Amino acid sequence: MDVEQLEKYSSAMTLSDMEVFVFPELMYSLVLANIMSPIIWQWRELDCFKKLQGKSTYRKLLRLRQFIMDEFEFNLDLETWGLTTKQKEFERFKGFISPQEIAASNGLFGYEGDKYYFDVDIRKHFGLDKYDGDVIPYWKTETVEAMSAFRLKKGYKTGAGECVSLSSLYAAAAFIVCEVPLENIYMILTPLHSQNFIDIDDGILTNNRRLVTKTMWFNGTEISNKAQRALRNEKVTIVAHSSGYIHCLYNDATINKAAYQHFTDRLSSYLSAALTIENFASFLRCYRKYQHYFQLCRDCHNQPQYLKAEVLFHYEHGSDNKIGCKSQEKLFADVSDEDFLPSPMPDRIRCDRLEEFMRTEKPDVKTAAGKAAFKKFIEPFIPEAGQLVDDLAGFLHVEAELPPITRNFVSSEPIKISVEQDREKIIEYLQAIRKTNSTADLAFYAYRDMESCDWEPFVKAAMERNPVSVEDSKSMSIEQVYKHLLEMKNDSIYDGKRLAQPDEMANYQTGDGLEKAFFLANIIHKRNPEQNLAITVKNNNVILANRKDEYRFISGKGLEKQITI
């Protein structure tokens, strides 16, 4: 491998936020690694999923969402995978992307977003504000094995992962468990987030552990507002798909152009809604400052009764019935008689008359003419009518800042696996295309398949990008570290001939003997970089040796190798 290849392939072993940004094909490589993993295939055999055979894809996705909610938590500990420095990362990637471009596009390097993000102090929200110097967290993305292993880590009762890990997990699980074709799954990365767009029905967006339908996107609730934050306020840096990727900084795009055009059209449709009374009610739910300009009317024994909008929104809390929907009449039934008024309030707009105006005039507030018509209707009652119309237009339509379709689309071999194939057939297919598809080849490195991969990237990653094991061992002598490793459980979080990196061992306190040898080698190498080390593994016996010392471990991996460090 040349220097650039080694940097990319070793990045598949550690999958930091920065590495995925620089090498965007790694995003889908992780999805493929998770698809090759036996873990998600085991989920498919659970009763909760087996009983959904024959049900709609949406029903299956809802069950998957609940499963992920139950089995994984959102990990916001930015230091789980240790610390690095901006200067070190700039130096690593200077041959690929300039420091200025990185800082403008990556959350760890100073990205702050648009005016909205300045207002809410987004860096403080994500805990990035304390990293205002040279030191930054690694912010690594986990494989499904590493996510599941969080239950072994102190303070965790379930698996866990950050947003990129969760989006990769969702993509793989949607394919395996819910039988969503890979072609229908688009991964969307922004400087501070990662989501998937699943192209079924009107579209479904994954958001950390949750799913967001188009109806949910426009329901005006706090949860939906949080789900919108990235696409409303950040530029999209990468879109990854089974046919390839497109990147905000790279001129060449490997994603199929027709597939990308289809995605942009479908996402645009998902992010736009017509002006209806239901959507206007959602707007008021989101923009509570405008509620006091509106009133609702109901018929009670042929007599009209009136109710302040903010009062009815108060009754909505905790109720399954919603304003502007068919269930509104049921919501009226929950309201105390004392809250109704016998006469209309002259300084408020009646929502029934507003609905009639919308139905007959059909104003499109995305256009200047539609905005003017709507403003004229509400102006007699609302001093800031212009601002309300602008806010309403913004609520009903989000323009995602995607990489432009004017990129140079280069021909590449797409990943063609079917929901009808079993795990063994998929692995066999991916093995067969490794020489012609770098994403498939990198997937085996992310999968940690040491039987079929070059070991040099694994060794480079283990010796250069595992600071947690070094930090945890800093007060121990080498002999104490060795003793600690011998006392540690001898179980790997990866099955078969696959290996964990040292920091995965450090976090989960378990590892195979060969993994322990790399852990100890990392400590020795950091303390004495000039010292030559050799790891020999044969017949399940592992020896880590330097000129004067030998450290022995037992491995169950069945690998045979001589490694020089």
Image (cartoon, helix red, strand yellow):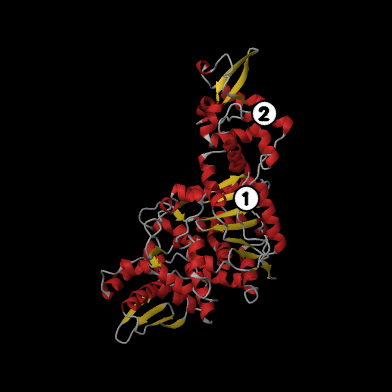
Residue 146 higher or lower than 499, as above or below: above
Residue 220 lies, in percent from the top left, at 56, 38
Instruction: Identify the residue at image location x=58%, y=46%.
Output: 212
Tag 1: Cα neighbours inside 10 Å, few (<14), some, or many (≥20)? few
The vertical placement of 444 against 168, above or below, is below
Could you tell me which residue is drawn at 53 percent across and 48 percent down? 229
Q: Can residue 350 be seen from the camera position used here?
A: yes
In the displayed image of the protein, which residue is found farthest to the bottom?
547
Q: Decide if residue 514 is in sight here.
A: no
Q: Amino acid at mark 2?
A: Glu
- Label placed on residue 355: 2
Precedes in sequence: disc 2 or disc 1: 2
For label 2, the SS is helix
Q: Position of residue 51 (x, y in %)?
A: 61, 46
User: How dense is the environment of label 2, judged by Cα within 10 Å: few (below 14), some, or many (20 and up)?
Assistant: some
Q: Residue 453's x, y, as percent?
A: 53, 76
Q: Please state if 429 lies on the left or on the right of 339 as rendered.
A: right
- Picture quarter with the N terminus: bottom right
> What type is the residue that disc 1 sits on?
Glu
Give the total number of marks visible in the rendering.
2
| Residue at numbered disc 1 | 399
Quick check: marks 2 and 1 in contact, CB under 8 Å? no
Residue sticking out furthest to the right: 360
Q: Secondary structure at mark 1?
A: loop
Q: Nearer the viewer, residue 248 or 27?
A: 248
